[in-house]
Amino acid sequence: MSRGISFEKHDHASCVNEALDVADQFCKAHKLQLTKVRRRVLEILLGQHKAIGAYDILAQLKAEGLGSQPPVVYRALDFLVSHNFVHKVEKLNAYVACSHSGQHHSPAFMICRMCDAVAEMQTSPKAGVFGATAREIGFEIENAVIEAEGICPSCQKDDAAQ
Amino acid sequence: MSRGISFEKHDHASCVNEALDVADQFCKAHKLQLTKVRRRVLEILLGQHKAIGAYDILAQLKAEGLGSQPPVVYRALDFLVSHNFVHKVEKLNAYVACSHSGQHHSPAFMICRMCDAVAEMQTSPKAGVFGATAREIGFEIENAVIEAEGICPSCQKDDAAQ
DNA sequence: TTTGAAAGTGTTATAATATAACAGGATTAA
DNA sequence: TTAATCCTGTTATATTATAACACTTTCAAA
Ligand SMILES: [Zn+2]
Ligand SMILES: [Zn+2]
Ligand SMILES: [Zn+2]
Ligand SMILES: [Zn+2]
């Protein structure tokens, strides 16, 4: 399982650029069209390690003259989600850029309720006690939503400093 | 961890009655008002081991003359959820009666995408690999959404029978 | 047993999230 | 270059959820 990188200090500019590069290459390789709108939505989401609502994204697109109606952003999100460039955080009805773009994987999230930061990590839903119980009762897991809410390391420090 | 009882054949009438009894007793003991609307919403949810949307519940209440506007059902759901008689299934934006009423616990769900049945089981979010990783990166888990989608045993059988 | 505070309900209005449907434009592959 | 496919623009509407305020019920203190 990978680390929750978004909670750690890192070179975010190159974090964004690398992810965009990966997306460009993946789409080229798989003959997918990473169009202007789609690429821009991904870029907006990559801008922050937070989950952003569809209508907030839409507001940005609008300001940039890149489409003004809900279907525009929802279609872009559908594309990005279906190819795993972006995930939906069900608990927030909001969307977050993937930290492991292009690969099929089962994400899990840790959501800070103070600063709204979201860290993604990888899971194996069929492993562990949960998977064992599923097998035991004969339930075939196809995909899993795993989202923990709590407080991130940096907000814990801030809290303690008071 | 308890079994996914809703996927198993069981005496559902007594399953409902027991849950209502537990709720009655819990509310009495904790001086909570399990009012007509609240009790009826719980009963409707207990009727099926499925997640039901707020507006579907509202439609039933309406038909029974028990309140006709959204806030009525959302307030009842707020009460029932806050006391753990009911859980929200985030993936479905829908609500399901708890199978372990009255006790504080961390539910996890298995949702059949064919018949919509929902089975609840108990988890310890802080245990396992996920919890370990959270501790490692210093994230304090307060609560977790764990919802697996897939196919329940009975739908698998039906499928195979084709 | 009044009476006042707290909790619950009824209702109107509106916010927030998401999709259906169809016309038109761009891209791709014959 | 043409047909098929995919993408976008737009209107309209569906679905889920909450704010705000008036009124009623419940409960407990006086
Ligand atoms: Zn970054
Ligand atoms: Zn934080
Ligand atoms: Zn039952
Ligand atoms: Zn099923």
Image: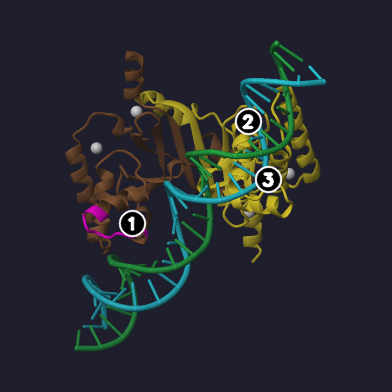
Chain colours: A brown, B yellow, C cyan, D green
**SS at circle 3:** helix
Q: Quadrant of the N terminus of chain B?
A: top right
Image location (x, y in percent) of residue A37: 25, 58
Magenta highlight on residue A68: yes
For residue B83, the mark is 2
For residue B45, the mark is 3
**SS at circle 2:** loop
> Which residue is at a point 55% across and 37% down the rendered structure image?
A130
> Which residue is at a point 28% across and 63% down the rendered structure image?
A32
For label 2, the crowd category at 10 Å Cα-Cα, with few meaning under 14, some 14 to 19 and many 20 or more, is some
For label 1, the crowd category at 10 Å Cα-Cα, with few meaning under 14, some 14 to 19 and many 20 or more, is many
Q: Are marks 2 and 1 on the same chain?
A: no
Q: Is mark 1 within 8 Å of ligand 1?
A: no
Instruction: Say whether marks 1 and 3 touch (CB < 8 Å).
Output: no
Comes first in the chain, label 3 or label 2: 3
> Which residue is at a point 34% across and 30% down the rendered structure image?
A115
Q: Is mark 2 within 8 Å of ligand 3?
A: no
Residue B125 visible in the displayed image: yes
Q: Amino acid at mark 2?
A: His
**SS at circle 1:** helix
Magenta highlight on residue A80: no
| B56, above or below B42, in the image | below
For residue A133, the mark is none
- Residue A75 placement, left or right of B88: left
Residue A103 visible in the displayed image: no
Chain designation of label 1: A
Q: Amino acid at mark 1?
A: Val
Chain designation of label 2: B
Image location (x, y in percent) of residue B51: 61, 48
Residue extent of the magenta highlight: A62-70
